Image (cartoon, rainbow, N blue to C red):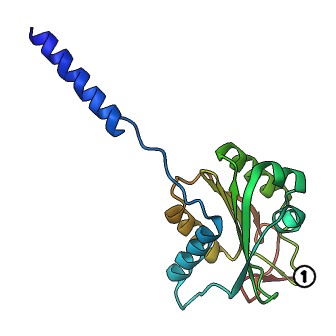
Amino acid sequence: MIKRNRFALFACLLALCLALGACGAPAPTQPEDAAALLDAIVESAGAKLGEEDPLPKTVTDAILAESSQGMLGIGESDFSQYVDAAFASNALISSHAHEVALVKCKDAAAAEKVKGLIAAGFDPLKWICVRPETCNVVVSGKYVLLTATNEKIGSALIEAFKEQSGAPLGEIDSFFNAADAGESAGTGGGLILN
């Protein structure tokens, strides 16, 4: 009789646990509005950096399939296949090598694919007289964040992405570092070529 009562109690607890969703870790929920998420990331990073090392003044634009090669290093067909929406925040002054892009992919598997495409295809030498100190790409769920800027700003942006994205971060791919490329430091958030 005691065994049956224990079994009945266990069955009731299991049913209640499943009904409340307490038995497994809940799936992370991510924001749906990529533009709003990028704004939140930039605002949070700016607050972290403060007045001492502020973010450059930027403008945010949508990235379309037609502009994806120049902005992200992804071809039109791959962009159309894997991406739902993408936005980039670029420095208003061209003497700042600064770009942060947020790509909302169709799912987490597509995000991993896009991360690899960006790391392989993004051109850190696209600015005329300056270079970013570092270029990083990282995934969080269905989102991919690209930073091409100085190290301090890039780190603040990635930390803000971690806080704002609603899912754990994957491994950060630092696919360009100007110090490794033999560039010399300059001013304005990027590097001036010798």
Which element carries disc 1, helix, strand or loop? loop
- Position of residue 59 relative to residue 26, above or below, is below
Task: Name the residue: 72% across, 46% down.
Answer: 110
Residue drawn at (60%, 87%) of the image: 54
Q: In which quarter of the image is the N terminus?
A: top left
Residue annotated with mark 1: 128
Instruction: Say which residue appears at 82% left-offset and 87% top-offset.
Output: 94
Quadrant placement of the C terminus: bottom right
- Residue 99 at x, y = what percent? 74, 75
Residue sitting nearer the eye, 49 or 5: 5
User: In the rendered image, is residue 22 in sight?
Assistant: no
- Name the spot of residue 163 as percent of width and height, x first: 49, 64
Above or below for 9 versus 75: above
Where does residue 158 sit, x and y in percent of width and height? 59, 66
How crowded pointer 1 is (Cα within 10 Å; few <14, some 14-19, many 20+) is rated as few
In the image, taking residue 43 as reference, residue 34 lies left or right, namely right
Side of 117 relative to 7 (left or right): right
Q: How many marks do you count on the picture?
A: 1
Looking at the image, residue 85 sits to the left or right of residue 130; the answer is left
